[in-house]
Image (cartoon, rainbow, N blue to C red):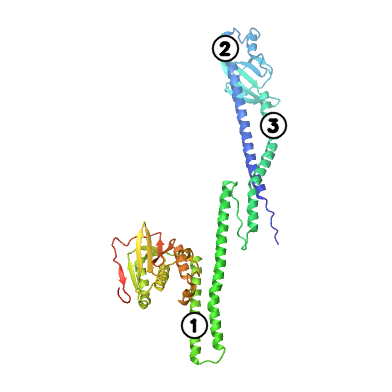
Amino acid sequence: MTLARPTMRLSMRLGLTVSALCALLVLGMATFSCLTISRQLDIRAQNELTDKLRQIRHSLTESSWSGNDRSLNSHNLRDQIVGHDNFTLTLLDASVPRRRLLVIGKDEGAPLPESLFNDQAQDFQALRSDTGHGLLVAASPMQLRSGQQVLAVLTLDRKDDDELLRAYVQSTLIALPVIFLLVGGGAWWVVRRSLRPLKAFGKVAAQVSARDLSQRLTSSGLPDELQGLARAINVMLQRLDDDISQLAQFSDDLAHELRSPINNLMGKAQVTLSRERPAEDYKQALESCTEELERLSRMVSQMLFLASINQPVAALATDPVNLREEADKVVELFELTAEERDIKLQVNGTACTRGDRLMIQRAISNLLSNAIRHAPPGTRVTLLLSVHSEQASLAISNAGEGIAAEHLPRLFDRFYRVHASRARHQGGTGLGLAIVRSIMQIHEGEVTVTSEPGGLTTFSLTFPHGAARLNSTTTTGKTYAIGEPD
């Protein structure tokens, strides 16, 4: 049995992450500042040495002092060093190895680079004194008034610079832990405060259930990122609420729709078996039960089809579809039905799209079946195909009683019927138009209906993508005259 590792709270994790980043930033800035200060101190020391050597050159040029007279007029050089306790001046002759001619300064025993005595002098050289602090040495060849060549070596004691840099480093090391604690505590507090709205999210999520989807998140006053998340969650909850409401309504409608044929079957069988009857009565009872069972079978098949297209397991395979050809095929299938009702079928126009051929045929078939069922005898059902703004449409129109305006919004709901008793008598299941709407939705299209009481009722299928006219020709309308002519 393995024990789960304790998880760190998000606020603590973010606080530590921000603290670590800030610590690295502060440490980097402190290091950069230390290097910058050290560099500036070096430049200042070099500038001081350069300026002082220039003054010494001027003094040696104007003075009558010579290397053989070490006491006479040496006070002119000492005047250049007075008040500068960190300077030491050493004059070396031009011989190899060089000899010290004069040493002026506080630290007259200051070490000098060996290269100065071997005629390998450099501009600036850094040394360390016996006490461990830094020295900066600058050497410059000069000519006395008498013409004698000497080497002026000026040494700058950088003890003050070292102490300044050491004090800065110490103060920084003392301040860094305090800064880290302040930054870490501030980051944790800010993160914890910023994540406070997530508690409201968790509270709403804990209250959501299949029986109660009315909870919603308040997006006002939230950061932009959380506002988008709150709106997305509210949209999700609304969709779930709508879907569960539709599922509950569908379950109620399904129970009602199945109860009627089952009660009919049970009642018919019980009446038939209540006493002895002739064989012909049993035959009629079985035929009646068979009709009800066929209607149940159609209903189950349509429900399975609706479930398959509403929850597809794979993407819809689309192929070029000639809507005129599909309309002609469907019309041929309904020729006998229309002929029995003395109804003419007419197809006009042409259009094409992309989609599933069999599904599109089924949508056209369901609409045409309804149109023939509700069209009065001696009238015409028209199928009109057209293309508008790269949208292919197919409109099926029939005359008749029409549909009242209050029924139009719910006409495509499952099991909804304008005239329930008449629809059941005609064998309808109330799922045909719902199937049409689902087919159009997966084709990214739509189905609409317009109706005038006592006038034309038109159902239109609109396919928004891939619609185009076939070549550049125009197909004349083909009329199927079924029954008596006008």
From the viewer's perspective, is residue 73 above or below residue 316?
above
Nearer the viewer's eye, disc 2 or disc 1? Answer: 1
The quadrant where residue 124 appears: top right
Asked if one can make out residue 50 in the rendered structure from this viewpoint, the answer is yes
Quadrant including the C terminus: bottom left
* Label 1 secondary element: helix
Nearer the viewer's eye, disc 3 or disc 2? Answer: 3
Using residue 218 as the reference point, say whether residue 459 is left or right of it: left
Q: Mark 3 points at which residue?
A: 171
Amino acid type, residue under disc 2 in the picture: His
In space, the residues marked 2 and 1 are separated at their CA atoms by 130 Å
* Label 3 secondary element: helix
Percent x, y of residue 106: 69, 17
| Label disc, if present, on residue 58 of the rendered structure | 2
* Label 2 secondary element: helix
**First-in-chain label (2 vs 1):** 2
Amino acid type, residue under disc 1 in the picture: Thr
| Label disc, if present, on residue 256 of the rendered structure | none
Q: Mark 1 points at which residue?
A: 290
Percent x, y of residue 446: 43, 62
